[in-house]
Amino acid sequence: MAISKDNVKSNFMELSGLDITSAEVYAGLITVCADEMEKAVDQERMVAEGGTAICEFAAAAEVFYRFICLKAAEYKVMFTAQGKAVEAFDEENRIKAARELRDSAVSRAERFFSKDGFVFNAVIAY
């Protein structure tokens, strides 16, 4: 049983709060992260030890982390009641929380990585 992109998408939707239509925008990112995880794991061990859901969640956590980084990179301007433009760009805590979630999820999945599971680690080490 391979990593299910549908399960990765579903987990990402739960983490992000996006509905199916909004999440569709990130289909490419979901595919990339699911494929990265699939290449990194030892499929036999993952399936034999019941780790598929753990690895799918780790892939979704990576999608979520990248999603948060993309959102943080958007230029944000708000207007006060007086019509004054102010920049709103306080995303540090959201990025930190998403990174911690991702790191925790990947840590749980690491036992299923193949000996050269470096592929996934190299991609997610920002």
Image (tube, rainbow, N blue to C red):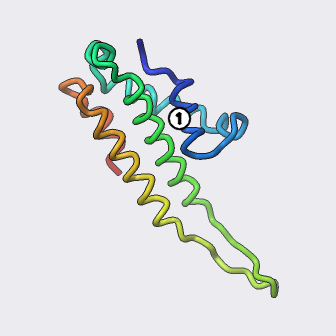
Please provide percent x and percent y for residue 41: 30, 24
Q: Give left or right: position of 107 versus 94.
A: left
Q: Residue at x 30, y 36 (%)?
A: 108
Amino acid at dot 1: Asn
Image: 56 above or below 91: above
Please provide percent x and percent y for residue 32: 48, 31
Image: 104 above or below 28: below
Q: Residue at x 34, y 23 (%)?
A: 51
Outermost residue, front side: 50
Q: Residue at x 63, y 65 (%)?
A: 75
Q: Give left or right: position of 57 versus 71.
A: left
Helix, strand or loop for disc 1: helix
The front one of 15 and 113 is 15
Q: Residues within 10 Å of mark 1 (few under 14, many from 20)?
A: many
Quadrant where the image shows the N terminus: top left
Q: Residue 72 appears in which quarter of the rendering? A: bottom right
Please provide percent x and percent y for residue 79: 76, 77
Q: Give left or right: position of 82 versus 95.
A: right
Q: Residue 124 appears in which quarter of the rendering? A: top left
- Residue marked by disc 1: 11
The front one of 38 and 51 is 51
Please provide percent x and percent y for residue 59: 43, 34
Outermost residue, left side: 115
Q: Residue at x 53, y 26 (%)?
A: 7
Instruction: Count the labels in the image.
Output: 1
